[in-house]
Image: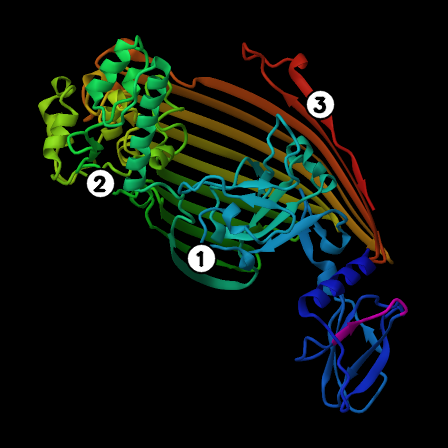
Amino acid sequence: MKTFLRIIAACCVMALTGLTVFAQTDRVVISGTVKSESGEPLVGASVIVKGATTRGTIVEVDGTYSISAAEGETLVYDCLGFVSQEVKLTGKSRIDIVMIEDTNFLDETIVVGYAPMRKSDFTGSIASVKSDELQKSTATVGQALVGRVAGVEIRQSNGAPGAGVNIRVRGVNSLTASTSPLYVVDGYPVADDDFINPNDIESIEILKDAASAAIYGSRGASGVVLITTKRGRDNEKATVTYDFSYGVQTLGRKVDLLNAREFAELYVEARNNSYWAYCQKGGVAYDPKDDNATRVAKLKAAGITQGVDNIGLSPFFWDFSKNDYASTAFMYDTDWQDEYFKRAGMMRHNVSVSGGTKNIKYMASVGYLDQNGIIAPSNHRQINARVNIDAQISKRLSMAASYSMTDTKTREVKTYGRSNGGGENTEGADGATQGCLVAIPNFPAYNDGSLTGTEAWAIANNNGNMKAEDWAAYNTEGTLARSWMNFFAKNWGINSSESPLVVAHDLPIKNTKTRHNFTVSATWEPIDGLKLKAQLGRLWYDQTYTKFRQNSIGSGANIAYNSALETSNHYAISRTLKNQDSLGEFTAAYNHKWGDHRLDALAGFTVQDNIYSSIGIMAKQFTDNRIPDISATVDPKAVEEYGVGRSEYNLLSYLARVNYSYSDRYSLTGSFRADHVSVPRANGVTSHQSQQVGHFPTSLS
């Protein structure tokens, strides 16, 4: 296995540096062998002229090499798992090298599940990322891993502030179950990573193959992400660290859309084509100069009544008296993407203190993230706090305690869903991003006072249903221009979408999340090499979600503030989610070395209980927007349940792992896990019939 790795490493070096051998008159050929202390040829070891990365070679199968170099130059000998050596040329034409094993490399430990292992003994597929390799200016851990882990797909599917990423370790391997990996933070399994401050992380190990992740059972089917947070060190003076970062986010690419003239031309052409098609159907003469009344009269005389409303040209776009575009058609040329997407800042503050003595080590940190979204007024604010304490009670007894807290407040913009609609289909409508892409460039984003008469004309049919104060808000200079497309949808064939800016600002969605996690563990070593560990932990999670659709958002042919919106399109939602998770892990780990043999064994069991509940209420029938709460409804009968549920499961698992290595060359690993999951019946009673059992054996050599 090590020989294979050496060859791969050498090939990578050759590919990256383009190693070639040059022959010049002042150079001589240096040859020799590169072997280990036991005399084994180190196949694939590299030999490079120091300071000239384009001159080098690799060691052959029999351990020999040859390279052209001049006197006074230095040769660098490098091999995976061995200490690098440098030799300065002093006239010798043959140099034999004996390389010494790098004990730090062999003894480096990695976290692979429930107990650490030597990296050299691990036989599975794992990717390791250290703290200094992370992009700590990002909002989440997943974003910090982008471009850092080979063979792992990390995709940002949602650009909202505070949003996480989708991580695929082995692709999509299930049609029904989750394809997201299991996250384990300091030994505690969790569902996601968006609550962790990247600055608190010491290292991340990703178990990529099924055999490595099998120790976590079915939950590790899509890979396992092991996160280890920072802790204090022995005999370390108290160190206070402050970090600050600031960044700017922008839209990566705009969609190529029509400008005002292009849309007006397309609109007039499309309506005239419809008129021509109806004329053909009715056998009447087609003349694009016919005004709207003439068009309808012609077709009705031919017996065509259905669909004749789709052939007229809005006076906003076309002036029949001049047989040309109306003066209002090109008064605005709004780039809705420029109005909707903005540059947004993101800043992070982190303060940490760490230190320790021989018996007590500690680390405490506080972080604050303030991230604006590129769609105003979206925003994400997050506070993180963490305390890690380690105590050496006696020579054979140690204890550790960890506490972490995350509090987030997010103002969301409803970007998903279709742009038009509303009412009962609360999740499928009011999609502001689609509204941005279909918004008419000939309509304004803000009222500027230049079209007061036209605005009054545009809402004449609805003004009777509008309160005086709402009319003032609708028609005030500098305010958001509302419901232009909603009005034109009724008679002039325009999509009935509200302005995306109105939807973004007047549909407040607020999400508040609080998470607390506390763990305590004790490790006792009764004899050398045997460690008995007990870890207890609990996680509390609370989330509050509120949404209020104001009647200042038009829907269909109903423009903003129309009283018809109060029945179904004016609503409030309030939802509360709670999750409580308890964990107990009890393991025994044994490691022993004799001669060239090394044995690592692990056995134990875990118990986990999870309770989840949610209750939501939706209310309609609001008279105004001043109290955005379900309690402000004028009709108590217009209140209904919205997303009510409760679930609970218990997980009892038995696990074991054995790793044997010989002479630090050959390794054999086997692991086994049995999961027993109990799910309550509908009446809340847990019975034997509700249990599911899974077994996960593996072996690697």
C-alpha separation, residue under disc 3 versus residue under disc 1:
45 Å
Residue visible at 74% across and 47% down? 124
**Disc number for residue 230:** none
Name the residue at 18% across, 37% down.
328
The quarter of the picture where the N terminus appears is bottom right
The reply to whether dot 2 and dot 1 touch (C-beta < 8 Å) is no
Residue 32 x/y as whole percent? 86, 79
Give me the disc on residue 693: 3
Give the residue type that dot 2 points to.
Answer: Phe
**Camera-side mark, 2 or 1:** 2
Residue 489 position, x and y percent, is: 27, 24
Q: Marks 3 and 1: which is nearer the front?
A: 3
Q: Is residue 628 visible?
A: no
Q: Nearer the viewer, residue 406 or 442?
A: 442
Quarter of the figure with residue 213: top right
Q: How many marks?
A: 3
Q: Which residues are magenta?
A: 56-62
Distance between mark 2 and mark 1 Cα atoms: 61 Å
Res. 272 visible in picture: yes
Nearest the camera: 111 or 317? 317
Work out how far the residue at label 3 is from the one at label 2, CA to CA, in angstroms: 69 Å
- According to the picture, the residue beneath numbered tag 2 turns out to be 330
Q: Indicate which label's residue lies in the foreground, 3 or 2.
A: 2
**In the displayed structure, would residue 286 be above or below residue 330?**
above
Q: Which mark is residue 353?
A: 1
Amino acid carrying label 1: it is Val
Q: Position of residue 175 (x, y in %)?
A: 63, 27
| Residue 284 found in image quarter | top left
Q: Earlier in the sequence, mark 2 or mark 1?
A: 2
Q: Residue at x 47, y 46 (%)?
A: 140
